Image (cartoon, rainbow, N blue to C red):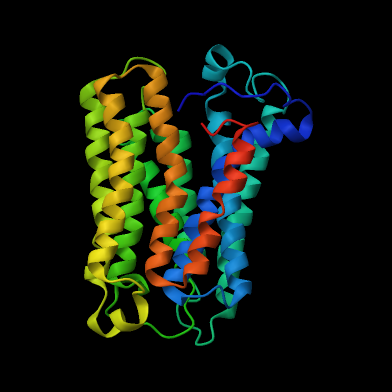
Amino acid sequence: MNELPETTPNTSGPVMAYLRLFRVPNLFTAIADVLMGFLVVHQSLTPWPPLLCLLLASACIYTAGMVLNDVYDIEIDRVERPQRPLPAGDISLTWARRLGFLLLGFGILAGAASGAWTETGQLAWRGGLIALLLVASVLLYDGLLKKTPIAPLVMGSCRFFNVLLGMSFALAAVPAEVLGGYQPHEWMIAGGFGCYIAGVTWFARTEAKVSSRWQLGLGVLVMTLGLLMLAWFPAFVSEIEKATLLQLPENIVFLLFMLLGGSIVYRCTVAVLDPVPARVQMAVKNCLQSLIVLNAAVTACVAEFTYAVLVLGLLVPMFVLGRWFRST
């Protein structure tokens, strides 16, 4: 993705350079994924030690992805985005590469550490495995497949595994016949977010120039599929669990996501009809910001409303920091 103009020039200094490199506003979307995933499984933020491990794992891996993205794109950025921290010389390329891989390692360790609190000993491996799969997706996207036609699918897998990471801690034993220990509705939620981000990535691939309407339209269709998966996840909750898990009737859940999805799709459709860079970039920014809203909506369906407000509150630091730092 290319860059939108910064709203203030006051971004000098080493700390500011690192925050620019990290695309810090978008970090809160990764945190929202993990909070929502944990709440889908537990309906509360307890036990908190494994939750903190999973949040740390997600934050480290997401940040590493941003760092390594610029490391691998250094030659392009020297020509097209010389103001970025690495081509501008604000941060050493060698140190940035080391930092990226250190963060990936910390992320895997933090994910694995979450299993230490599993009371039954079952699925204690799951946090570490999902963190490892998330790291593999990040490296495939940043280092090998970013310029290929399947890059959006790989980016979608990053979001898919990040949501599964939030769902990875289990206190009780899970039936052996359940794939990976995840319930069908959990696969549906993670798949919905992965599909949505794959669509956003397709939509954003040529945002810096006049985009192809066919490509933009494909992105909108894939996004819509992801939104429909989120709207239909209650249908995949077992009849036994529906009474305890779902806080809203199924028809209300569907209506909620149709309203949220309609707003997102409308903004993207405007850009499809007039595919100038400014409209496409604003649509992409809205799609990324809407991730937190969608996470909050899922949370409202499965947990107390106060938890949904907590997830939605992550928009505040995202918007505040977004005034100083680019999100793409």
Q: Quadrant of the N terminus?
A: top left
Q: Nearer the viewer, residue 249 or 3?
A: 249
Quick check: 107 left or right of 202? Answer: right
Quick check: 66 left or right of 298? Answer: right
At x 40%, y 53%, the residue is 294
Quick check: 102 left or right of 176? Answer: right
Among the 4 quarters of the image, the one containing residue 15: top right
Task: Using the rendered image of the protein, determine whether residue 175 is visible from the camera's viewpoint.
Answer: no
Instruction: Estimate the x, y position of residue 243 in percent, counting from the top left.
Output: 31, 83
At x 59%, y 56%, the residue is 107
Q: Nearer the viewer, residue 273 or 62?
A: 273
Instruction: Estimate the x, y position of residue 42 in percent, counting from the top left.
Output: 47, 76
Quick check: 274 left or right of 80? Answer: left
Instruction: Estimate the x, y position of residue 315 in percent, counting from the top left.
Output: 54, 48
Q: Residue furthest top?
A: 79
Instruction: Estimate the x, y position of residue 144 in percent, counting from the top left.
Output: 42, 34
At x 47%, y 35%, the residue is 143
Q: Is residue 199 above or below residue 102?
A: above
Among the 4 quarters of the image, the one containing residue 183: bottom left
Among the 4 quarters of the image, the one containing residue 141: top left
Q: Is residue 139 above or below residue 7?
A: below
